[in-house]
Image: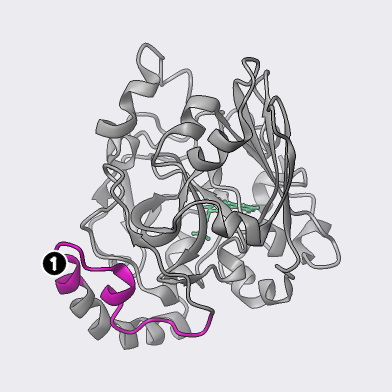
Amino acid sequence: MRLLKHHRFDHPLSSEITPRAVHLRRREWLGGLAAGAAALALPGASFAQAAATPPGKLPALPGARSAVPGSITMERATAYADISTYNNFYEFGTDKADPARSAGRLKTRPWTVQVEGEVARPGTYDIETLLRLAPMEERIYRLRCVEGWSMVVPWVGYSMAELIRRVEPTGNARFVEFVTLADRSQMPGLSSGVLDWPYLEALRLDEARHPLTMLAFGLYGEILPNQNGAPVRLVVPWKYGFKSGKSIVKIRFVEKQPRTSWQKAIPGEYGFYSNVNPNVDHPRWSQATERRIGEDGLLARKRPTLMFNGYEAQVGQLYAGMDLKKDF
Ligand code: MTE
């Protein structure tokens, strides 16, 4: 129970306070976003173009507009300044501002991702190889955190299915585990016992293979800022944000359902599936509504949360016949 007092998921309201620096940067961005919204309405417009004021600080990572059904929400993208300063990355601390402050020291080159377990072609993939493995796509996904806030993020990457196909899972592979970096020399948050390190998340194989499940390498047309999970992270848009592990170093194909870091920490609150579901309350707060970072002020009425975060048409059939109250 000590853990609960210290981790931020205990305080959904405190997460809504916007630091002044973020607020000021957001204002600089507003003009650009209006132009961006107009560009998005044009068929074929690229999101890198749409961000009329591209961040410009990191190497470019362009991608072609994705054709995966559901991969482009028409909702307004959250400002880069918010996406990159309001983060959960507990390896760098539990405050939303900690990752932007201290993830700069993370070394993302050289970087390898080990693929192991129930696959015909296990191996160690260099990040440069992964970057060339499949064509880069731009996708605009909603990201909803279990804490009750959401963002709209223009990611760059490709379907996890591209990698899965190449490593050829065996008939025994039923789940995919994502293990992320745990390096005390680079990650000050590891000295806290808030989670069982390394951060581990997992999906059922068919969830991992779904075309919306993405390996992301960039956002807003640039490589990922370290605080958003550089050099490679998972993005699963219909699940609460914590299912999307950052800075992945190992992908393991296994037969038995893994126990994830959040399940180990608080099994009664964070189930394996963690699909966004407004009908299943978190034991300590409702999940029926959410606040959009950068748009909804503290006094604004919260917006309703959608089943599967709005991706029900694409992913609902993966859970046919399951009791989503039990399998939360
Ligand atoms: N991955 C690692 N390795 N460590 C973390 O603490 N936090 C998760 C997820 N992935 C986390 C992680 C949570 S709770 C959320 S909401 C998202 O990352 C946040 O991603 P973002 O900062 O890009 O918005």
Please rate how many residues cluster around mark 1, counting C-alpha atoms within 10 Å: few if below 14, some from 14 to 19, many from 20: few
- Which residue is drawn at the image coordinates 31% and 44% (left, top)? 68
Q: Name the chief secondary structure element in magenta.
A: loop
Query: Residue 233 vs residue 123: left or right?
Result: left
Q: Is residue 43 magenta?
A: yes
Q: Amino acid at mark 1?
A: Leu
- Which residue is drawn at the image coordinates 78% and 54% (left, top)? 182
Q: Quadrant of the N terminus?
A: top right
Q: Is mark 1 within 8 Å of ligand 1?
A: no
- Which residue is drawn at the image coordinates 23% and 85% (left, top)? 31
Q: Secondary structure under badge 1?
A: loop
Q: Which residues are magenta?
A: 37-58
Query: Residue 47 vs residue 148: left or right?
Result: left
Which residue is the site of mark 1? 42
Question: Residue 293 is drawn in which quadrant?
Answer: bottom left
- Position in image of residue 73 (x %, y %): 25, 53
Question: Residue 298 is drawn in which quadrant?
Answer: bottom left
Q: Nearer the viewer, residue 52 or 11?
A: 52
Query: Residue 302 vs residue 319: left or right?
Result: left
- Position in image of residue 64 (x %, y %): 34, 61
- Position in image of residue 233 (x %, y %): 57, 53
Q: Nearer the viewer, residue 192 or 317?
A: 317
Q: Vertically, is 194 above or below 57?
A: above
Q: Is residue 136 magenta?
A: no
